[in-house]
Image: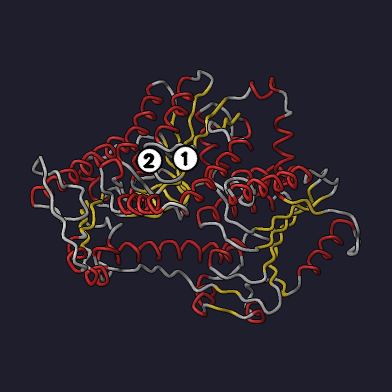
């Protein structure tokens, strides 16, 4: 009850603050974005239980920058890095939007105490000026990919990992089954790192007016001091944030000491932008072609009571609603998912196929990842966009369990059993697979993989042999996927919406009425979810039985000990 009361008090105080934070926008302003948290794809996936509104929705920020470019009140844009850096895929889309904003003739500055990753610096190169606080560093040590391998310690404690995969590049459980990186995994990770780094280096070189060799020389240093960063041209100003504020005030008002409140936070501007859009004449909006925007973000699963965007039971009704709406001609599906349950993925794909049969065009926009089950649901789209750094493909399947038999024996616990059915112990963690059970697992592997490559071949217009060559469980970047034929073009959600506009018979996305099919949770729904979570936590701390059940459920989930939880990964 103490936890519940504390949660309620915190929630009410948050609402009170949010209610007060509704100032009018100034007639002359500079948009200010203090970036403390990474962006989210949809409002229902972000924030502390969706209440504190720390994490902004990427599309909201992109739309706000496009709106600001045409807003005569907005004179410029300044970002301060204060914490998390967006994923590389989100960086791509934000960078593109910032560069579009700059074409309007308005300035864009970025400030940070330090640029502590290649991704952070890559984002910074979209701005007119890169400011660094004195004593800060620019750490751009390239790309380092590491994987832990636990097989040695599992052997010592008597846990035997038993996982099956189709095919050689499907390495999701390799950390458990091996003590070192396989040749196939090393090949894929080397190719991913090489492709991503080449893309980032090229874009940095263009933005900073350097040669590729000059960029690589700075990357090879790994870490540059404040003076080194300035001398080598990685930053434009080595100065303090108060001086940046004064310079911006002087540029906008002519007085560096002006008391005018010219800075408007991105969050407030977005709220105002949404308000103005809501007040737009319904008649004017209805004249525009309607396009449905649907998100499949997160693990692809069958059921989720909290409204997970990639849960089949949640997304399929939304797809059907769009398919049945005569005013909607195109469905844009935004995918940001590493995979999940093949049954759920197939159900979602089927809903999209039925939508196509109902006359809808399907355009896919891939975010940070659209891999494995994420690609499964994309395969039948009319057109697929990915970002250069999107992880996609991974057309394969893996799963299994761990056997705890040796561990139990080591601590003196013996398990015995009776069973009806030759393979009744298939999902038991207390015994290894029998030859008959292993045969059934392999049969399931073959079935899922063969159907996976068949649906990809059909969706992409390839032969089974062509598909198998680019499948095998291998992960590709978006750029590599274009070359492999898995993706049609490079671009973000804006590019997908522009293409949807052409399919709808208009020029670009500004001529569309984009319908967000999954409504954000209401404040009441967020409050209920928070209280449910706190109640669950209270029960957790006061019940040993709940603890054991939770641990057991987690272990079953991790080891995929059931077909419904079997991961297409």
- Closer to the camera in the image, 299 or 403: 403
Residue 282 visible in the snapshot: yes
Q: Residues within 10 Å of mark 1 (few under 14, many from 20)?
A: many
| Disc 1 target residue | 308
* Above or below: residue 461 compared with residue 243: above
Q: Residue at x 59, y 35 (%)?
A: 509
Circle 1 sits in a helix, a strand or a loop, which is it? loop
Quarter-of-image position of residue 110 = bottom right
| Disc 2 target residue | 301
* Above or below: residue 498 compared with residue 268: above
Q: Residue at x 75, y 47 (%)?
A: 17
* Above or below: residue 218 compared with residue 535: below
Circle 2 sits in a helix, a strand or a loop, which is it? loop
Percent of width and height locating residue 38: 57, 55
Percent of width and height locating residue 340: 35, 45
Asked if the residue at tag 1 contacts the one at tag 2, i.e. Cβ–Cβ closer than 8 Å, the answer is: yes
């Amino acid at each position: 009850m103490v936890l519940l009361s504390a949660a309620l008090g915190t929630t009410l105080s948050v609402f009170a603050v949010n209610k007060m934070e509704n100032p009018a926008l100034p007639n002359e302003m500079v948009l200010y974005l203090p970036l403390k948290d990474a962006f989210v794809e949809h409002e229902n996936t972000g924030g502390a239980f969706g209440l504190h509104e720390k994490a902004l929705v990427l599309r909201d920020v992109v739309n706000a920058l496009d709106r600001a470019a045409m807003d005569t009140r907005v004179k410029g844009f300044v970002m301060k890095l204060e914490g998390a850096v967006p994923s590389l895929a989100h960086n791509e889309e934000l960078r593109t939007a910032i560069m579009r904003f700059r074409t309007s003739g308005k300035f864009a500055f970025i400030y940070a105490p330090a640029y502590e990753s290649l991704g952070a610096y890559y984002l910074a190169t979209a701005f007119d000026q890169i400011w660094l606080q004195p004593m800060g560093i620019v750490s751009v040590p390239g790309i380092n990919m590491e994987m832990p391998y636990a097989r040695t310690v599992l052997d010592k404690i008597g846990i035997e990992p038993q996982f099956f995969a189709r095919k050689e590049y499907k390495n999701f459980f390799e950390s458990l089954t091996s003590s070192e990186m396989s040749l196939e995994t090393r090949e894929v990770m080397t190719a991913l790192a090489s492709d991503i780094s080449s893309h980032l280096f090229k874009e940095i070189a263009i933005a900073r007016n350097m040669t590729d060799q000059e960029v690589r020389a700075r990357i090879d240093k790994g870490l540059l001091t404040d003076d080194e960063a300035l001398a080598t041209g990685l930053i434009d100003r080595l100065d303090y944030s108060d001086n940046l504020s004064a310079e911006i005030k002087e540029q906008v008002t002519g007085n560096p000491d002006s008391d005018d409140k010219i800075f408007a936070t991105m969050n407030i501007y977005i709220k105002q932008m949404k308000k103005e859009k809501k007040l737009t004449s319904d008649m004017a909006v209805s004249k525009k072609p309607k396009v449905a925007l649907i998100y499949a973000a997160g693990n692809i699963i069958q059921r989720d009571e909290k409204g997970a965007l990639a849960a089949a039971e949640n997304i399929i009704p939304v797809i059907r609603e769009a398919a049945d709406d005569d005013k909607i001609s195109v469905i844009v599906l935004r995918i940001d998912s590493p995979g999940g349950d093949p049954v759920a993925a197939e159900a979602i794909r089927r809903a999209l196929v039925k939508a196509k049969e109902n006359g809808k065009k399907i355009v896919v926009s891939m975010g940070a990842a659209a891999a494995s089950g994420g690609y499964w649901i994309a395969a039948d789209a009319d057109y697929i966009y990915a970002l250069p750094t999107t992880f996609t493909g991974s057309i394969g399947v893996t799963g299994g369990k761990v056997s705890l038999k040796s561990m139990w024996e080591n601590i003196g616990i013996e398990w015995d059993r009776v069973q009806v059915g030759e393979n009744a112990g298939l999902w038991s963690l207390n015994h290894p697979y029998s030859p008959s059970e292993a045969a059934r697992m392999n049969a399931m592997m073959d079935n899922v993989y063969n159907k996976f490559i068949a649906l990809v071949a059909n969706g992409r217009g390839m032969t089974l042999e062509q598909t198998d060559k680019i499948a095998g469980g291998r992960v590709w970047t978006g750029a590599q996927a274009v070359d492999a034929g898995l993706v049609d073009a490079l671009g973000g959600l804006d590019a997908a919406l522009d293409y949807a506009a052409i399919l709808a018979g208009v020029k670009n996305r500004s001529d569309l009425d984009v319908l967000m099919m999954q409504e954000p949770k209401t404040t009441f729904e967020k409050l209920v979810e928070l209280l449910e979570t706190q109640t669950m936590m209270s029960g957790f701390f006061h019940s040993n039985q709940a603890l054991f059940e939770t641990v057991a459920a987690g272990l079953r989930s991790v080891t995929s000990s059931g077909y419904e939880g079997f991961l297409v990964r």
